[in-house]
Image (spheres, rainbow, N blue to C red):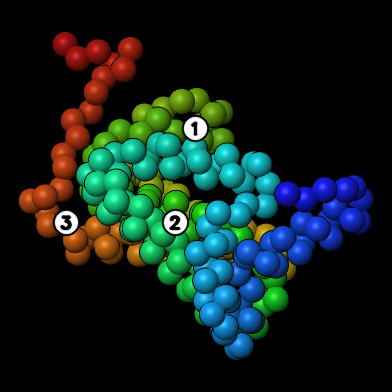
Amino acid sequence: MAYGRGEALLGAQSAYFERWGVIPAQLTHHPTLWSLLTPLTALFVHGSWLHLLGNMLFLYVFGAMTEERMGRVHFALFYLAAGYVALFGYAIANAGSEQTLVGASGAISAVLGAFLRLFPRARVTSLFPFLLFLPLRFPAWIVLVFWFVLQWVAARHAGSGPGVAYLAHLVGFAVGFCYAWGRYRRSDRVEVKAVATEGERQP
């Protein structure tokens, strides 16, 4: 827990992130046992409450059905392994960076990728800014492909300084989708019938 105020607080936060987060240059150029563990520890550290709550929202929406399909233990191992690979992949692609990387977004993205493979027709309530944040229901494949494209575009324009690690999102999503593709045959994929909400009652 960080304490104090002003520069003392910022220094304590920075030291905490450096202790538990991924530093790509250390992980790729001078790996130690501890640095090899940081892609795992970084999954449990977030830069802010907004960062944490955003990840938990995506996990709540897409994680429950994926966990039910995989099983609790299997899902937990998948989550940790995919998150590790996502952060490690980002570190390799940014091997010279001294910026600290924290957060579970890579693991959450893997859950999204697996969900797309397992439940492409499940309907998801979404809020799009260009549609005035109206709550609309779309098939998961539309929402998740749109999300992936946004991450791809953002990653291509991302700078080298502090910010969002969009590449980790892309790596995690690809890992999750490919794992679900290889692990679950087409005949094993669960078909979810759309449930009509109020105003969408079936005749």
In primary-sequence order, the first of circles 3 and 1 is 1
Mark 2 is surrounded, within 10 Å at the Cα level, by few (under 14), some (14 to 19) or many (20 or more) other residues, namely many
> What residue is shown with label 3?
184
Q: Nearer the viewer, residue 65 or 117?
A: 65
Q: Secondary structure at mark 3?
A: loop
In primary-sequence order, the first of circles 3 and 2 is 2
Foreground mark, 3 or 1, reads 3
Q: Amino acid at mark 2?
A: Ala
Q: Secondary structure at mark 1?
A: strand
Mark 3 is surrounded, within 10 Å at the Cα level, by few (under 14), some (14 to 19) or many (20 or more) other residues, namely some
Q: Relative to 53, does residue 15 appear above or below in the rendering?
A: below
CB-based contact (under 8 Å), mark 3 and mark 2: no
> What residue is shown with label 2?
107
x and y, in percent, of residue 105 in the image = 51, 54
Residue at the location (24% across, 58% down)?
A: 180
x and y, in percent, of residue 157 in the image = 61, 65
Q: CA distance from mark 3 to mark 1?
A: 30 Å
- Which disc number belongs to residue 127? 1
Mark 1 is surrounded, within 10 Å at the Cα level, by few (under 14), some (14 to 19) or many (20 or more) other residues, namely few
Q: Relative to 187, does residue 126 appear above or below in the rendering?
A: above
Q: Amino acid at mark 3?
A: Tyr
**Residue 187 shows in the view:** yes
